[in-house]
Amino acid sequence: MDTVVKHKPKYSGKRYRLDKPELLAPAGNLEKLKFAIHYGADAVYIGGQKYGLRSNADNFSFEEMREGVEFANKYGAKVFVATNIYAHNEDLEGIEEYLRNLYEVGISAVIVADPVIVDTARRVVPNLEVHLSTQQSTVNWQAVKFWKEEGLPRVVLGRETSLAEIQEIKDHVDIEIEAFIHGAMCSSYSGRCVLSNHFTDRDSNRGGCCQSCRWKYDLFEDARPETTWVSEEQAQEDRAVQQFKLGVTQLPLFAEEDNAFTMGSKDLCMIGNIPDLIDVGVDSFKIEGRMKSIHYVATVVNVYRQAIDAYMADPEGYELKQEWIDEMNKAANRPLNTGFFYDTPDHEDHIYEPEEKAAPYDFAGLVMSYEEETGLVTVQQRNHFKPGQEVEFFGPGGTFFKQKIDTIWDEEGNELDAARHPLQLVRFKVEQPVKYFDMMRKKK
């Protein structure tokens, strides 16, 4: 990414309702929710135990939702719930009670794709905001206008929408626009994929996507003889024979030393393009990743928080900092690009060879307390580390430094040769002050 030295705003339209873009982060469980908000998210989106598209995430009980809402309220943040399956008949039983419970625990909005759930939410809990899910593949201003006239205050655009199309939408419709600006991209159209259904009998649009596009594949050529005209009876017989011989009539189109290929796309990253997103009027910057780690969520949220705040404080003097790019790369799982915002992605924006796991760092510890007089920190172990190892500390707002760990003690003052046990509390000296909830990471 090239560093942006200065930027002059070019969007002259009106920003509707939100004077500053909302930073919306994923939270796969209660702990991730707290990290996302602590590191700067204005809002988080979570999944309940029904009606969402991430059935493999931890997801939230109503009790956990209530605790999450209480935590968010302390920071002036909001909690949204993804209720964005495409419902079959049997899925709709209990939806009214579920929506009432969401409203009762203090959820600010539901993110919905199915028109039946949209209608049910507006009828049963009229004071609960309904945001249109990206699963609706909304990419033009007339569709956005339709949903506004249906009473929805916000639309999450399909990932296929360009910046030019977003500006046109904002020019025509007075509504909040939410757009994904970071995270994994689906190789299908707005998630409308059925590979998972066919390969594993798991419905992608009911929360069961197995990420078939990320699997490794080999290529074969069917070595059946050339087609000739035959009778229907003979054709039936030939098909049966070919089915029987299927295992021995396929010729590999690869050598043994070749890598298997995948069909997954590169990940989206717009940290280098914050001014353009703000200029066209995107109201909510959405980060993908309810299944991602705490380290990923905290790092990505922290970087976007700093960039948004810097731009809003001084648009014309805004500069993209190299340290933000460096931080983002420490959490990247795949190669990055800008998705559909500027151009239609082509073959270069897909990953056809085994993915290089770009994220070179592990979350090693969480700061629980710091003694200014002694310089001692108490860290909760999240990954093995030991004396002599170089680590990095980082926290909200850009706190960052590196150091080598010296002597480690346990809570009783016994010297340790390593911090080996999950959630173990250990102490050692740090070279700079740290705060509660700062994080420590190490190279893999």
Image (cartoon, rainbow, N blue to C red):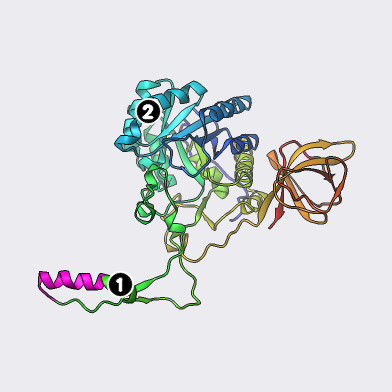
Residue 179 shows up from this direction: yes
Up the image or down, 273 lies above or below 263; here it is above
Residue 184 is covered by the magenta coloring: no
* Residue projecting furthest to the right: 373
Horizontal and vertical percent position of residue 314:
63, 37
Q: Which residues are magenta?
A: 229-243
Looking at the magenta stretch, what is its main secondary structure? helix
**Residue matched to label 1:** 246
Callout 1 secondary element: helix
Q: On the image, which quarter does residue 375 sit in?
A: top right
Could you give the CA–CA distance between mark 2 and mark 1, rounded to whole angstroms? 46 Å
Q: Quarter of the image containing the C terminus?
A: bottom right
Residue 230 is covered by the magenta coloring: yes
Callout 2 secondary element: loop
Residue depicted at x 46% and y 41%: 179
Horizontal and vertical percent position of residue 170:
41, 36
**Residue matched to label 2:** 94
- Amino acid at the residue labelled 1: Leu
Q: Residues within 10 Å of mark 2 (few under 14, many from 20)?
A: few
Mark 1 or mark 2, which is nearer the start of the sequence? 2
Horizontal and vertical percent position of residue 213:
43, 57
Going by the image, does 228 lie left or right of 27?
A: left
Going by the image, does 187 lie left or right of 143?
A: right
Residue depicted at x 46% and y 31%: 14
